[in-house]
Amino acid sequence: MELLFIRHGQGEHTLNPPESLHITDPGLTEAGILQAKSLRKQFPLSDTELVISSPLRRTLQTTQIWSEGTDCAKMVSPLVSPRMFPQNPEWQTLPCDSLLPREKVKEEFNEFSIEDPSGEWWSKGINKSSQQAFTRIAERFLNRCKQTGKKRIYIVSHDGTITAYRQYMTGRKLSRSDFPKETGEVRMTIN
């Protein structure tokens, strides 16, 4: 099975750091919207495909714009929500990385199914989870992907999360220089 991790389009929180990192619930910028639209040509979706999105506005908007006009399955999972990379227990989750509540996702993005609607990760996310906890999260998520029976799954997520999954799956030590660019992709294969 092939997993294509796609970083979301440019978000409002990236325009004027560090101040803009304190924006709560940032959406896509105009450039981010154009980037999401460009995914349609780069990765055309069909009704047989699945896109899994992180539960943040910018990832949900990226998926929504990219998948417009298709009947592909769309799912939201907190197991691909923002993750600090590298981990530092002294760092705090920034307001721009707070998960949308399930109720808000259901209300504003009702074409998405919600994975594990009562799970613990919906309340706290994976941003500050220990490496040991992340290993369990990654195993659970990858097993869930295998259970879908899909040959390819697209995952719209965040630079640190994508890099954490990539490091876990390859066993190679990665750094922030390995982050994908906006709407950049990382292809991984699992058996």
Image: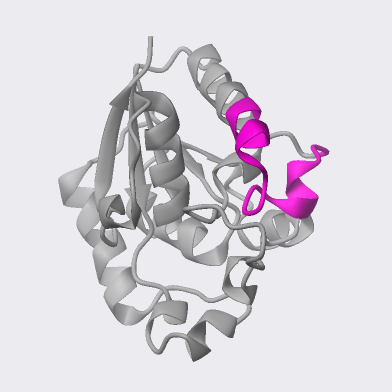
Residue 182 image-quadrant placement: bottom left
Q: Is residue 182 left or right of residue 100?
A: left
Viewer can see residue 69: no
Quadrant location of the C terminus in the rendered image:
top left
Residue 70 image-quadrant placement: top left
State the image coordinates of residue 126 (x, y, percent, origin top left): 64, 47
Above or below residue 142? Residue 80 is below
Above or below residue 3? Residue 181 is below
Q: Is residue 16 left or right of residue 97?
A: left
- Disc count in the image? 0
Q: Residue at x 37, y 79 (%)?
A: 29
Does the magenta run of residues contain 141? Answer: no
State the image coordinates of residue 156 (x, y, percent, origin top left): 42, 48
Residue 46 image-quadrant placement: top left
In the rendered image, the residue lying farthest to the left is 41
State the image coordinates of residue 6 (x, y, percent, origin top left): 34, 47
Q: Residue at x 68, y 62 (%)?
A: 100
State the image coordinates of residue 33 (x, y, percent, origin top left): 33, 70
Does the magenta run of residues contain 120? Answer: yes
Q: Nearer the viewer, residue 185 or 137?
A: 137
Quadrant location of the N terminus in the rendered image:
top left
Q: Residue at x 64, y 52 (%)?
A: 110
Report the span colored magenta. 118-136
Q: Residue at x 54, y 50 (%)?
A: 54
Viewer can see residue 33: yes
